Image (tube, helix red, strand yellow):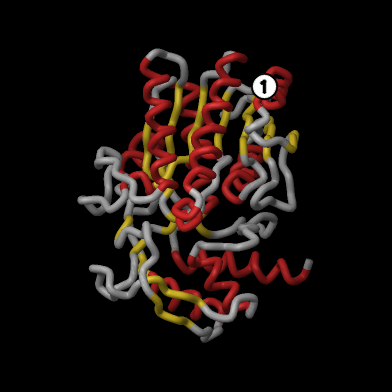
Amino acid sequence: MANLKTKVLLTGGAGYIGSHTAKLLTKHGYEVIIIDSLFPSQSKKFYGNFYKLDLAEEEKVLEVLRKEKPEIVLHFAAFISVPESIEKPFLYYENNVGNTIKLLSAMKKVGIKNFIFSSSAAVYGIPDIIPVPETAELKPINPYGETKVMVEKILKDMARVKEINYVSLRYFNVAGADPEGELGPTYKQPTHLIIRALKVAKGEIPYLEIYGTDYPTPDGTCIRDYIHVMDLAEAHILAMEYLLSKRENLVLNCGYGRGFSVREVVSTVKKVTGVDFKVIETSRRPGDPPILIADNTKIKEILKWRPKYNSLEDIIKDTWQWELKQNEN
């Protein structure tokens, strides 16, 4: 059970995944502190004690840590666009690696040792085994994935000399929105398939591009393991409670263990929205593996994680309701 006095600090806690996790933490009785620069996306609703800060402002971050003295830090603050990471690699290394090092440095100075890291299935690149286990070779094919591998290596080395206790959660394709309608994705220029497809259905984008139809998959399009953001938020709380009680370092996949192709997602979006929107097939994007599906055995066994929203249709319905609500505001 949650201790009402347990303080949890979330970097990027006003972003998509961070805000959903902050809401759930509040429901579980934790005291939530958020550090967020409010760039590039932000929630319209904040949970907990909020500080508008960039992690590059190390001294100010240090002040917050000294003042609030959280027992654990959940690190969501990162840039996440694979195509952008290919175009602007230094930006990604500077923010995702450099600012994480600054955060870890501030934590060390204050004596905070517990850390939950937002990693990614991008660390696997094009995996040799599907579903991919946590033990698979790390061979990212884009700078975004490289940044996640680098931070995981830093955490592993720090843990070896007892400087940190951590859980690294390797997200597969996160989608969906708060079923209660309070939160959802707020990307100004979304790159994720489901959001883009729904915005095409709404008429905000003229057409949907399918990047590559010649992949070695049944219908020629990429296959991904989509996980509902609320199930992922729950995984964070379970990981946090495990770390605080066991002090054991873990690396865990966060996915459902099954995948859907781009064409299957498009078909489901058309079914849910009732809109037969325009789709254009184009060439592959650099940095896209053909298939990414999680082996989620470990997270189910160790954390007793039991997904509640593991239906592609439910993921799309919740996101669609959120998108429609944005037009009312």
Q: Quadrant of the C terminus?
A: bottom right
Along the viewing direction, whichever of 304 and 296 lies nearer the viewer: 296
Q: Is residue 260 left or right of residue 232?
A: left
Tell me which amino acid carries mark 1. Answer: Leu
Image mark count: 1
Height in image: 277 above or below 100?
below
Of 213 and 253, the residue lying toward us: 213
Residue 178 at x, y percent in the picture? 61, 56
Is residue 254 something one can see in this rendering?
no
From what the image shows, is residue 164 above or below residue 2? above
- Whether 121 is drawn above or below 238: the answer is below
**Quadrant (top left, top right, bottom left, bottom right) of the N terminus:** top right
Report the residue at 52% width, 86% height from top: 276
Residue 3 visible (yes or no): yes
* Closest to the observer, 114 or 6: 114
User: Crowding near pointer 1: few (<14 within 10 Å), some, many (20+)?
Assistant: many
Q: Nearer the viewer, residue 217 or 177?
A: 217
Q: Read off the residue under disc 1.
A: 62
Quadrant of the image occupied by residue 69: top right
In this rendering, position of residue 305 left or right of residue 196: left
* Residue for point 44% across, 47% down: 144
Residue with the most extreme left position: 128
Q: What x and y, as percent, mark residue 99? A: 56, 33
- At horizontal 58% and vertical 27% (from top left) the residue drawn is 103
Residue at 37%, 57% in the rendered image? 287
Q: Quadrant of residue 246?
A: top left
Image-based side of 12 in relation to 193, left or right: right
Query: Percent x, y for residue 265?
Result: 43, 71
SS class, disc 1? helix
